[in-house]
Image (cartoon, rainbow, N blue to C red):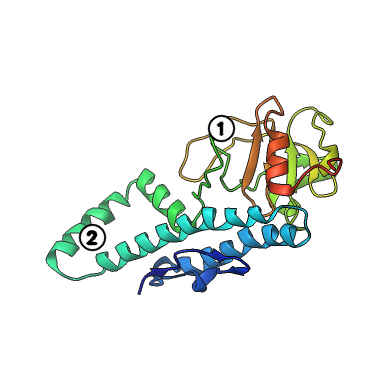
Amino acid sequence: MTRQAVTYRKQRVLLAGDAAHVHPPMGGQGLNIGVQDAVNLGWKLAQVVKQIAPDSLLDTYEAERHPVAARVLRNTMAHVALNRTDPRTRALNEIVSGLLRMDEPRRSFAAMMSGLDLHYDLGDGHPLLGRRMPDLDLVTADGPMQVFTLLHRARPVLLNFGAPGGIAIAGWTDRVQLVDTEYRGAWELPAHETVSAPTAVLVRPDGYVAWVGERTQAGLTDALTKWFGASAGTS
């Protein structure tokens, strides 16, 4: 059985996990996307309930997560088809198996199955925008630290890789943690080539990148307002 709800939200009712989508268990993807539904929705719902962000923020939940489940439904149906035992399907299975012995198709398929290649459409910009933030080994004033450690409090984090104190977010310091840091390695994305190093990255509580700075703060105020409400100084 493969089914998906037409909409994930109707007024005060929101669907997530198996209530929103069901499919064959191939690849163990159901748990991953169910948890990710909850993580995507949780921080948005909290901000709306606390009147930090407008009700319209909840519309981004369906916009981001509905296509993710639709893709999982497609690839699990493909798995079912490849498990058939007729001669034509066996031939197709052999061809697919041959492709998966190659590095590039194997990396791409693994990223799709794990969900690490998800890319929310947050507009044009740096390849990191809308993607899951890599768990980098950072150097901070408090010592070595990994990115995901900073997300344990379920708060947005603005990582400043430029000059310390070079970014100001005075109106959002009650909601966004600003961390001056260094990273000395390569920036890589799953199933993608190495990308250019940004000077700053705004990471949402669900681990996805909401804004990328490339030597300027252009667009930062808009991103902060869109995802985390108006500046505290705005009446």
Q: Residue at x 35, y 47 (%)?
A: 105
Whether residue 137 is visible, yes or no, is: no
Q: Position of residue 48 (x, y in %)?
A: 72, 58
**What secondary structure is found at the residue carrying circle 2?**
helix
Q: Find residue 42 and report its image quarter.
A: bottom right
**What secondary structure is found at the residue carrying circle 1?**
loop
Q: Left or right: 52 with respect to 76?
A: right
Q: Find residue 39 and report its image quarter.
A: bottom right
Tag 1 residue = 125
Whether residue 222 is visible, yes or no, is: yes
Categorize mark 2 by other alpha carbons within 10 Å: few (<14), some (14-19), many (20+): some
Categorize mark 1 by other alpha carbons within 10 Å: few (<14), some (14-19), many (20+): few
Which residue reaches farthest left?
87
Q: Relative to 78, say whether 173 is above or below.
A: above
Q: Position of residue 215 (x, y in %)?
A: 69, 24
Q: Earlier in the sequence, mark 2 or mark 1?
A: 2
Q: Position of residue 189 (x, y in %)?
A: 53, 42
Picture quarter with the N terminus: bottom left
Q: Residue at x 85, y 43 (%)?
A: 235
In the rendered structure, which amino acid carries the disc numbered 2?
A: Asn
Mark nearer the viewer, 2 or 1: 1
Q: Nearer the viewer, residue 102 or 205?
A: 205
Q: Residue at x 26, y 66 (%)?
A: 81
Q: Position of residue 138 (x, y in %)?
A: 73, 42
Tag 2 residue = 93
Q: Left or right: 153 with respect to 188?
A: right
Q: Nearer the viewer, residue 10 or 92?
A: 10
